[in-house]
Image: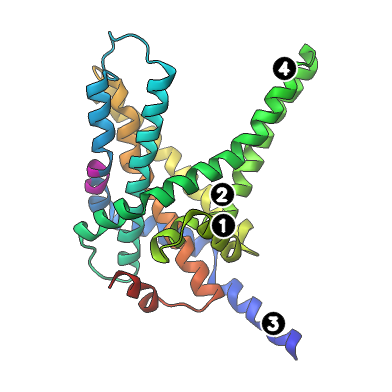
């Protein structure tokens, strides 16, 4: 009897979490919240733009940027992206609850939680990069043929590592925003929520990644035509459109996993913002 009940629960859970349903919900939510997300992206990414202006990063005639300047650029970009991600996750949840999203609350939520989001992003990125670094180091002492083979394997390892890490920690951002968890607690929470659903999550990420690639191509074309004199703005232009898409997927996956595995509804999730 216990085995039958467990099988019934598993079957019910599988009917709830579906790749097509979660992906289409993410895309619909992204499109309907795009005006708000674009405005929030402009606000969140403004410090990065100001820094590049003040530091001469947009000056084509300026000397090549030093390694220290590049690190500062990356840290500022990551911090701004973390703030934006938190903002968009809040807006996406409000949309899923069919409630209006206050921009002021979205901004304060993103700013309040950006440090855990940033740290979580750095940890997950490190989990992807470390295998690549190890293989690159091993390839340095190899002969040319072996080095070529190892470098080819780097691409395979990168794809596999990225797929695994993305699926395992897909719910971490949602846990940080909705449950106010710290980085390590959020990663642990994500491991719990994504268990048994990592393959469907991968396909959701894969499908949204295709859409993100198309959007990137469109915005790259627009940027090429409109920003001929300022091509350095291209990454910010792309981030304005793509970061809200990936953040919306994080919100939808987190919600769907909690609804599937824990039976939590939107009304209960909404209490965290009250």
For the residues labelled 3 and 1, the Cα–Cα distance comes to 22 Å
Residue that label 1 marks? 201
Q: Main secondary structure of the magenta part?
A: helix
Closer to the N terminus: mark 3 or mark 1? Answer: 3
Closer to the N terminus: mark 3 or mark 2? Answer: 3
Residue that label 3 marks? 6
For the residues labelled 2 and 1, the Cα–Cα distance comes to 8 Å
CB under 8 Å between discs 3 and 2: no
Number of labels in the image equals 4
Residue that label 2 marks? 166
Residue that label 4 marks? 140
Closer to the N terminus: mark 2 or mark 1? Answer: 2
Residue 162 within the segment the image draws in magenta:
no
For the residues labelled 2 and 4, the Cα–Cα distance comes to 29 Å
Residue 179: x, y in percent? 42, 66
Residue drawn 39% across the image and 38% down it: 78
Q: Nearer the viewer, mark 2 or mark 4?
A: 4
Near mark 3 (Cα within 10 A), the count class, few <14, some 14-19 or many ≥20, is: few
For the residues labelled 4 and 1, the Cα–Cα distance comes to 36 Å
Q: Nearer the viewer, residue 22 or 80?
A: 80
CB under 8 Å between discs 2 and 1: yes
Residue drawn 35% across the image and 64% down it: 93
Closer to the N terminus: mark 4 or mark 1? Answer: 4
Residue range (magenta)? 39-43
């Amino acid at each position: 009897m216990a085995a039958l009940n467990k099988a019934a629960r598993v079957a019910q859970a599988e009917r709830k979490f579906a790749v097509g349903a979660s992906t289409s919900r993410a895309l619909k939510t992204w499109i309907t919240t795009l005006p708000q997300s674009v405005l929030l992206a402009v606000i969140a990414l403004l410090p990065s733009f100001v820094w590049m202006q003040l530091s001469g990063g947009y000056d084509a005639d300026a000397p090549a940027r030093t390694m220290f300047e590049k690190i500062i650029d990356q840290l500022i970009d990551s911090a701004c992206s973390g703030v934006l991600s938190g903002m968009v996750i809040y807006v996406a949840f409000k949309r899923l609850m069919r409630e209006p999203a206050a921009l002021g609350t979205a901004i304060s939520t993103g700013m309040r939680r950006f440090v855990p989001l940033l740290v979580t992003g750095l940890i997950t990125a490190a989990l992807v990069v470390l295998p690549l670094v190890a293989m690159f180091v091993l390839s340095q002492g190899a002969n040319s043929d072996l080095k070529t083979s190892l470098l080819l394997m780097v691409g395979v390892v990168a794809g596999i590592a990225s797929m695994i890490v993305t699926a395992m920690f897909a719910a971490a951002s949602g846990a940080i925003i909705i449950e106010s968890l710290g980085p390590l607690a959020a990663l642990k929470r994500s491991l719990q929520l994504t268990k048994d659903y990592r393959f469907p999550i991968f396909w959701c990420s894969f499908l949204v990644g295709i859409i993100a690639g198309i959007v990137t191509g469109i915005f790259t074309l627009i940027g090429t035509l409109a920003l001929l004199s300022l091509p350095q703005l291209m990454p910010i232009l792309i981030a304005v459109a793509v970061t809200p898409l990936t953040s919306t997927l994080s919100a939808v996956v987190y919600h769907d996993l909690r609804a599937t595995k824990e039976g939590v509804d939107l009304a209960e999730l909404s209490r965290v913002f009250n």
